[in-house]
Amino acid sequence: MPTVPPRTSFVSTALVAVGLLTCVYLAALKLLDLPCPLSGCAGIINTHYGSLFRVPLPLYAIPLWLTLAVPGGQPWQTRVQLLALAGLALGALALMVIQFFVLQGFCPFCTLHAAAAIAAAIVVPRRGRAHAWLPVAMMALTLPLLFAVKVIEKARVESWDLPGQVAPPPPANGAVPAVTDAPAAIPASVDKAALNWLGDFDPKLSPILIVSFQCSHCLDLLEQTLTHPHIGTLKGPKIFVYATYGTSADTIAVFAAILSAGGTPQEQFATVFAQQDAFRDPLITHNSKELNRRLAELFPGYARKLGEAKQLFDRQALALKYIPGRGSPYIQFPDGSSKYGGEVTPAMLFH
């Protein structure tokens, strides 16, 4: 019968450290809206497979990793550690199957975690558990790092001068517009491109909301507005949808689905986003083929609206050149203040 030696091992400590670090970071990606420096991470962790009962899966794995650093020796402690190893390894294998064959994506941190879990299941029963000081050391190092990354990313997002940003063209009379995040710097014509899915907006009093259909927080935020008790009775924000170069076609497809639904813009939005669970995963993972298939099943007339949706997207892209902030969700209030990421709540969208 396999067992876990009571001694400690630096190899086991290294594997547990990798497992804990990846778990903490993947959980932060979902809970704190941290950026992912490598492609694919957010796309995998933000699908339905990335959480259980609305709790990110990495949070379930953290206690299992911590168990491997608890001093053992008693038979029941050995059994608990062996069960933790088995749970980590089997969970890693299952999630790798989902990642590569169901979602057809690749998350470097998820894969690194799986490799550490499988290696730990082999190494720990032979060499021993991790050192007891590891959990404290990991928390002392990772928490300040995550906070620093969050602060840096927020500052980058809320800055006007971002890499690659195209400055708005000067007006016809040759005057140079002021570069400021005050509402006065945004031409009134931009309001004509804004979407009023959450109700009519006031050009002077309504906040500006920037979302992305590839942002899990944005999708959650938009879905939550459907149950807001005051939706339809108050003025909503001016909505702009941001998309990167590689995801513009998916954004246009969702636009087309909304345009194909009947009723007012508010009713069209509610019709589509009430069913977002049916197409959320291919939207998040950039699986355009599967996204189009599901949209065609849900909204048969969406294909006829693709041309109109492309024009709508182009107007949005042009308007975004005048609006500071490139995060999602991002909300700017009439007084020039702003919020980003998890700080944006449904209550902020109405006035």
Image: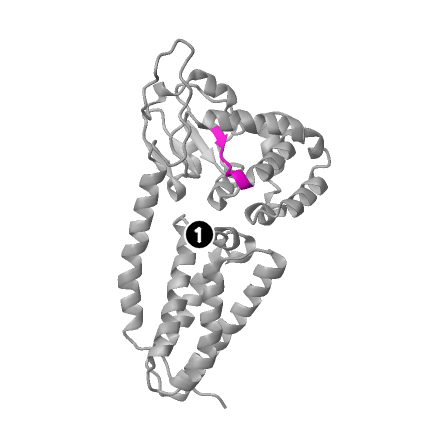
Q: Nearer the viewer, residue 139 or 11?
A: 11
Q: Is residue 337 magenta?
A: no
Does residue 41 appear in this view?
Answer: yes
How is the structure coloured here?
Answer: one colour
**What is the x, y in percent for residue 25?**
39, 58
Q: Is residue 265 above or below residue 17?
A: above
Residue type, label 1:
Lys
Q: Bounds of the magenta span? A: 239-246
Q: Helix or strand or loop: what does disc 1 sit on?
A: helix
Q: Is residue 244 magenta?
A: yes
Q: Is residue 230 above or below residue 80?
A: above
Q: Is residue 137 above or below residue 30?
A: below
Q: Determine the residue located farthest toward the bottom in the rendered image.
A: 1
Position of the C terminus by quadrant: top left
Q: Quadrant of residue 335?
A: top left
**What is the x, y in percent for residue 154?**
34, 42
**What is the x, y in percent for residue 231?**
50, 31
Q: Mark 1 — residue? A: 30
**What is the x, y in percent for residue 164?**
41, 35
Q: Quadrant of residue 100?
A: bottom right
For label 1, the crowd category at 10 Å Cα-Cα, with few meaning under 14, some 14 to 19 and many 20 or more, is many
Residue 69 relative to residue 253: left or right? left
At 72% across and 33% down in the image, what residue appears? 301
At 47% across and 80% down in the image, what residue appears? 122
Residue 46 relative to residue 27: left or right? right
Q: Determine the residue located farthest toward the top in the rendered image.
A: 173
Does residue 52 appear in this view?
Answer: no
